[in-house]
Image (tube, rainbow, N blue to C red):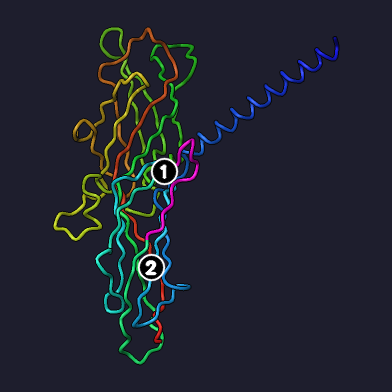
């Protein structure tokens, strides 16, 4: 009898440990998805050890890895070479389609794009010609943050939480929400108005562009990309209560200017919330949509045959 009880207790303990391990693993994977401040990462490989030979055909490979949590389904990659040394056929640009990190896929998608090139004949007396090639990426991206903040009633003498500034790291994208601060002020009747101050920073090495014009930065077009502009939408909780932000409205979202790589925006819930909800914590939902331009360079050598 005692053996059966011991065996049952052992089985229950094993099941508990398995469930605990699984839940911890899921939490770690979920947390890791929306971390970091990278979007697309590129690296260039030319010929053999970045050496190409005159009067031959060769290949230039560009590895592109999505290291963030956003999905890239609207972007292009453009190879730039010194035309006096290298001739590129018509495939100078490639379409970018790369999945980001997710709970089921903790590593973002990586694709190698191959460019076939022709190396021109060297007319000078030099045996080695050092030069630089580059790859430009232009793509639309998104950053999402959902920090937990305190909605404190102004007349609450013993609040269960207190207003404070919540500091944040990266959310898996180059444009990051770095902090969120809440303030609640009295409104009409038995209502209060939550005010949310959000700080945003470009932590990547590239340039933030207005999403609908981002491809213009990589294409030969007369229309220029609008620099340092992004779109934001924010909600006070998961009930869909949208915040109104103090910037220009653009198709339901708010257009914001990223001055010198950073900006601070104030959003409020105009309709207010009843005091009867009391002081409580709430998860603010913040979505950023933007374009991103980045360029990677690589030194190569062209040799006489």
User: With 79 as the anchor, is 6 left or right in this view?
Assistant: right
Specify the quadrant of the image occupied by residue 258: top left
SS category of the residue bearing label 1: loop
Tag 2 or tag 1, which sits nearer the N-term? Answer: 2
Which residue sits at x=28%, y=46%? 74
Quadrant showing the N terminus: top right
User: With 15 as the anchor, is 209 left or right in this view?
Assistant: left
Seen in the picture, residue 197 relative to 126 is either above or below; the reply is above
Decide whether residue 301 is among the magenta residues: no
| Residue denoted by label 1 | 100
Seen in the picture, residue 90 relative to 195 is either above or below; the reply is below
Q: CA distance from mark 1 to mark 2?
A: 25 Å
Decide whether residue 109 is among the magenta residues: yes
| Residue denoted by label 2 | 60
Seen in the picture, residue 247 relative to 60 is either above or below; the reply is above
Q: Main secondary structure of the magenta part?
A: loop
> Residue 236 at what x, y percent from top left?
35, 23
Front in this rendered view, residue 299 or 51: 51
- Is residue 259 among what the camera can see? no
């Amino acid at each position: 009898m005692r053996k059966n009880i011991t065996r049952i207790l052992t089985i229950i303990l094993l099941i508990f440990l398995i469930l605990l391990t699984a839940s911890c693993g899921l939490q770690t994977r979920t947390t890791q998805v929306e971390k970091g401040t990278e979007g697309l990462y590129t690296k260039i490989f030319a010929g053999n050890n970045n050496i190409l030979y005159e009067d031959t055909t060769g290949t230039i490979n560009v590895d592109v890895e999505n290291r963030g949590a956003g999905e890239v389904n609207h972007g292009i990659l453009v190879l730039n070479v010194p035309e006096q040394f290298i001739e590129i056929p018509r495939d100078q640009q490639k379409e970018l389609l790369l999945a980001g990190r997710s709970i089921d896929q903790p590593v973002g998608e990586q694709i190698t794009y191959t460019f076939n090139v022709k190396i021109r004949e060297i007319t000078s007396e030099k045996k080695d010609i050092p030069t630089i090639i580059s790859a430009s990426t232009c793509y639309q991206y998104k950053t999402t943050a959902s920090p937990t903040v305190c909605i404190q009633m102004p007349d609450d003498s013993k609040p269960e939480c207190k207003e404070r500034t919540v500091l944040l790291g990266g959310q898996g994208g180059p444009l990051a929400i770095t902090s969120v601060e809440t303030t609640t002020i009295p409104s009409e009747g038995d209502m209060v108005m939550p005010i949310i101050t959000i700080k945003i920073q470009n932590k990547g090495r590239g340039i933030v562009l207005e999403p609908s014009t981002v491809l213009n930065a990589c294409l030969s077009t007369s229309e220029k990309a609008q620099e340092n502009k992004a779109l934001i939408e924010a909600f006070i909780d998961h009930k869909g209560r949208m915040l109104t932000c103090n910037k220009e409205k653009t198709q339901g979202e708010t257009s914001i200017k990223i001055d010198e790589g950073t900006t601070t925006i104030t959003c409020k819930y105009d309709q207010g919330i009843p005091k009867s909800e009391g002081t409580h914590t709430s998860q603010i939902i913040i979505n950023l949509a933007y374009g991103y331009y980045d360029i990677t360079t690589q030194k190569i050598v062209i040799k006489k045959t």
